[in-house]
């Protein structure tokens, strides 16, 4: 198989590329504009085994088409996207162009070049701010109602995929709606746990990344956004999933599509931790008691968002290996130190 990975130098894409290089003999072509991805990540991946890298922005439609043709691509894993929620509110067109328009063109090129498998990274942000949280978490049938252009740009891309697959019988897709992805490369051969790749995105807003920066001394302090939510300790509750478990689902998805039809899957552990619990865990595993203040709620933050992951576990037989908040925090911290 010849696989194209867009955004393969980024956080999630690079973990998938790592697993593809380690566990398959497929030919891998990584396409990335290096706006947030890095050469260091590509260098680390190159030590696993050879792959082809093309520096290109997906808005170069003709070049994208040519790349699919010349490399005889049969599967696309599409990660390249803009992902900062507040920025999407300030600059929605960037999100509709980078995410929805570029994805639509990529799908068009895929159909033209008879690429028959397309794996798409979507987000739990498509569910917006649920008015209630079902006992077992949010399942894939839950109302989709994004509350920001980021979530909407992803939901619109989902619709383009669904409609295209309905019209083209040999085009299949898997949509993954990610919950809160965190942690870094678990290096099996090294008991010291030294991640080779991780999240390098500048000015990150994610909780575990920020807590790791505090534990490393890169940041003086952090704040808890809201302590008056209707949750176990008043702080926001989320479903944190280790990036290597998430990456593994993408490898499974390619096998799954051989004998099954297109589908959408939530991906999370189905288990919630509060902001306080996450910060305490980070402080415990690193033995660093950094300063934590209280701050008002962040606009648009739901009290709790937890996945119902029954579908991916039963239909795709996905078996997570790193459902352990300590390991997630520790690997994130070790990466941050590097
Ligand atoms: C994040 C992403 C969203 C993505 C979703 C699912 C942002 C703003 N949101 O959502 O794009 O679709 O994951 O993968 O990038 N918190 C603090 N202090 C901090 C940082 C966060 O208290 O300094 C709290 C938040 O209020 C929230 C929780 O920690 O309750 C998690 O926040 P975050 O890591 O930013 O993720 P989400 O906003 O849930």
Image (tube, rainbow, N blue to C red):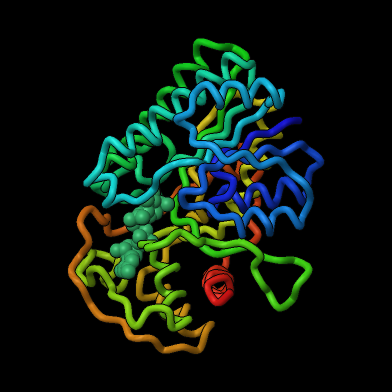
Q: Residue at coordinates 72% horizontally, 45% vertically from top-left?
A: 20
Q: Is residue 265 left or right of residue 158?
A: right
Residue 106, x across and y down, in percent: 51, 26
Measuring 64% from the left and 37% from the top, which residue is drawn there?
Answer: 253
Residue 89, above or below 225 = above
Q: Residue 118's x, y, as percent?
A: 58, 29
Asked if one can make out residue 261 in the rendered structure from this viewpoint, the answer is yes
Tally of numbered discs: 0
Q: Which of these two is toward me, 12 or 244?
A: 12
Q: Quadrant of residue 314?
A: top right
Where is 311 relative to 85, above or below? Answer: above
Q: Quadrant of the N terminus?
A: top right
x then y, percent, for residue 302 = 27, 55
- Residue nearest the viewer, comparing 160 with 135: 160
**Residue 193, image x, y percentages:** 68, 74
Asked whether the viewer can see residue 305, the reply is: no
Q: Is residue 48 left or right of residue 302?
A: right
**Image quarter of residue 76:** top right
Q: Quadrant of the C terminus?
A: bottom right
In the displayed structure image, the side of residue 52 where residue 212 appears, left or right: left
For image coordinates 35% across by 40% down, the residue present is 126
Vertical placement of residue 277 versus 153, above or below: below
Q: Residue furthest right?
A: 25
Residue at image x 46%, y 48%? Answer: 35
Ligand 1 position by quadrant:
bottom left
Whether residue 258 is situated above or below residue 54 in the rendered picture = above
């Amino acid at each position: 198989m010849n696989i194209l990975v867009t955004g393969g130098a980024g956080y999630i894409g690079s973990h998938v590329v790592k697993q593809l290089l380690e566990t398959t003999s497929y030919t891998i072509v990584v396409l990335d504009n290096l706006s947030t991805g890095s050469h260091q990540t590509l260098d680390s991946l190159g030590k696993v085994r050879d792959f082809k890298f093309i520096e290109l922005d997906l808005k170069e439609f003709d070049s994208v088409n040519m790349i699919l043709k010349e490399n005889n691509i049969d599967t696309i894993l599409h990660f390249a996207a803009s992902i900062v929620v507040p920025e999407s509110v300030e600059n929605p067109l960037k999100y509709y162009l980078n995410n929805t328009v570029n994805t639509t063109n990529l799908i068009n090129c895929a159909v033209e070049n008879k690429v028959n498998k397309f794996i798409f990274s979507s987000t739990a942000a498509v569910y917006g701010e649920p008015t209630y949280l079902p006992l077992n978490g949010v399942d894939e049938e839950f109302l989709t109602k994004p509350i920001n252009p980021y979530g909407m740009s992803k939901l619109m891309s989902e619709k383009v995929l669904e409609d295209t697959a309905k019209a083209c019988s040999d085009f299949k897709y898997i949509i993954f709606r990610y919950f809160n992805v965190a942690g870094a490369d678990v290096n099996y051969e090294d008991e010291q746990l030294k991640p080779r790749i991780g999240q390098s995105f500048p000015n990150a807003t994610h909780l575990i990344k920020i807590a790791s920066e505090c534990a490393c001394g890169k940041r003086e302090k952090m704040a808890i956004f809201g302590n008056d939510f209707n949750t176990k300790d008043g702080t926001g509750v989320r479903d944190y999933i280790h990036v290597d478990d998430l990456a593994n689902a993408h490898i499974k998805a390619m096998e799954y599509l051989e004998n099954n039809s297109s589908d959408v899957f939530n991906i999370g552990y189905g288990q919630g931790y509060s902001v306080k619990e996450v910060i305490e865990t980070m402080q415990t595993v690193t033995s660093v008691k950094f300063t934590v203040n209280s701050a008002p709620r962040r606009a648009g933050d739901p009290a709790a968002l937890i996945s119902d992951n029954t579908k991916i576990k039963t239909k795709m037989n996905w078996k997570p290996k790193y459902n352990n908040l300590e390991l997630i925090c520790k690997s994130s911290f070790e990466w941050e130190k590097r």
